[in-house]
Image (cartoon, rainbow, N blue to C red):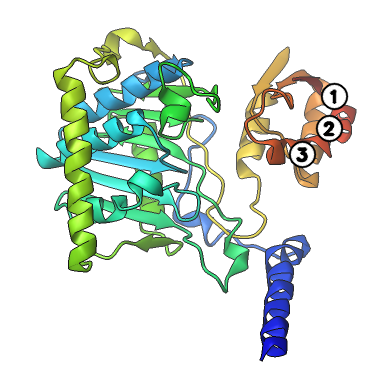
Amino acid sequence: MLHLLFYLILLYVVYVFLTAFVLFYLPIQKTCKEHCVYKASSISGDDQGTNQVMLLDDGFESGQARIQMIREAKRMIRLSYYSIQKGKTAEWVLGALIEAADRGVKVQLLLDGICHSLRGPLKNLRYAVANHPNMAIRFYEPFRLFKPWTWHNRLHDKLLLADGRVVVMGGRNIGDKYFADQPPKDFAFDRDVLLYNDKKGKVLDEMEQYFVYLWNHNFTKKTKAVFSKQKAKKGLKLRKKLLRSYQEAVRTKEPFVVSSFNWAADTTPVKQIAFFTNPVERFNKRPLVLKKLNDLAHRAKRSVLIQTPYIIPTRPMKDDLTPLASEIQTTVVTNSLAATPNPLAFAGYLSTKKELMKTGVHLYE
């Protein structure tokens, strides 16, 4: 019996190795069928001239902006996030969402199906949200034991849309690691951009269409509407706890929940803006965003500056960078090993660093 169990485990490990790793090195042909369901902006983007933006460099301020968006929403709030992590700021964001739902706002929360971080105090969040008449939660590519090729297909979006008129997107997930006023040891120094358009605008429409596309995608799993009485009870208890935490923060005028941004006055008008996405597909994703950024970069006359936390270029990506760097001064700023919060991602960059420099790119860490 033990021998049989050993061989079954060994067979499974081989299966995982072949389908989760080796399969990604095979030249799999792809068509546009999947991606053509949702089309991102053209390079020209939105020429209406009514878009306004604000750079959110400070983590605490970025969290405040999200809370105010939720507080002011009247119709619909849509959130797409890689993870919701521990801490008071996460409790307050979730409490604000529950308060918004209580006053009639529809709330849709889309999380990565493996890295959502709903553990510990938040482990019952799916029950708390799914049992509210104005809230829904779904998970993108949840863990499937016998489909290892799906494990790499993660949702890295950090997107919050409120009433189709204001959006925050960028590098921050939700939690003290990103928003705390007194940063913890694992604090992530990140960046977001807030986009405001009182007339809604083409690009904000495209962002909403993208969210709806992901929300209804067959990679995304719906949460059950009916649970056992025990799970429903735990969910209701957590919902009440999160709402009380937020309401107490409002009552005591906690700075995180009582900001007073003026979106029209505090943002800067921009002439053009565009929204790009890669295809929603498994295996090796085609780098369509990089190609569109390359198209933009080739319009430059003097220089191009790229700032990114991670650089893990595939061969086709490096081939795209080479002609750009030879024609225009191209500078890339990225994390050093000391600064990165993700050593594994840095290892992927380190192995291609010398090849990247051979393209002619000016590389800074």
Q: Nearer the viewer, residue 217 or 321?
A: 217
- The answer to whether marks 3 and 1 mark residues whose Cβ atoms lie closer than 8 Å is no
- The residue positioned 21% from the left and 23% from the top of the image is 249
Q: Residue at (73%, 35%) from the top-left corner? A: 346
Is the C terminus in the top left, top right, bottom left or bottom right quadrant? top right
Q: Is residue 323 left or right of residue 149?
A: right
Q: CA distance from mark 3 to mark 1?
A: 26 Å
Element type where label 3 sits in the image: helix
**Front in this rendered view, residue 264 or 153:** 153
Q: Is residue 40 visible?
A: yes
- Residue linked to disc 2: 353
Mark 3 or mark 1: whose residue is earlier in sequence:
1
Between discs 2 and 3, the one toward the N terminus: 3
Question: Is residue 255 shown above or below 78?
Answer: above
Mark 1 → mark 2, Cα distance in angstroms: 17 Å
Indicate the quadrant where residue 324 lies. top right
Please identify the quarter of the rendering in which residue 148 is found.
Answer: bottom right
Tags 1 and 2 in contact by the CB under 8 Å rule? Answer: no
Which badge, 1 or 2, is on the more N-terminal residue? Answer: 1
Q: Amino acid at mark 1?
A: Ser
Q: Quadrant of residue 166?
A: top left
The kind of secondary structure element at disc 2 is helix
* Residue type, mark 2 in image: Lys
Residue 326: numbered disc: 1
Residue 33 on image: x %, y % = 53, 62
Give SS at disc 1.
Answer: helix
Which amino acid type corresponds to the residue marked 3 in the rendered image? Ala
Q: Between tags 2 and 3, which lies in front?
A: 3
- Residue denoted by label 3: 347
Q: Residue at x 30, y 34 (%)?
A: 91
Coordinates of residue 6 in the picture (x, y in percent): 71, 82
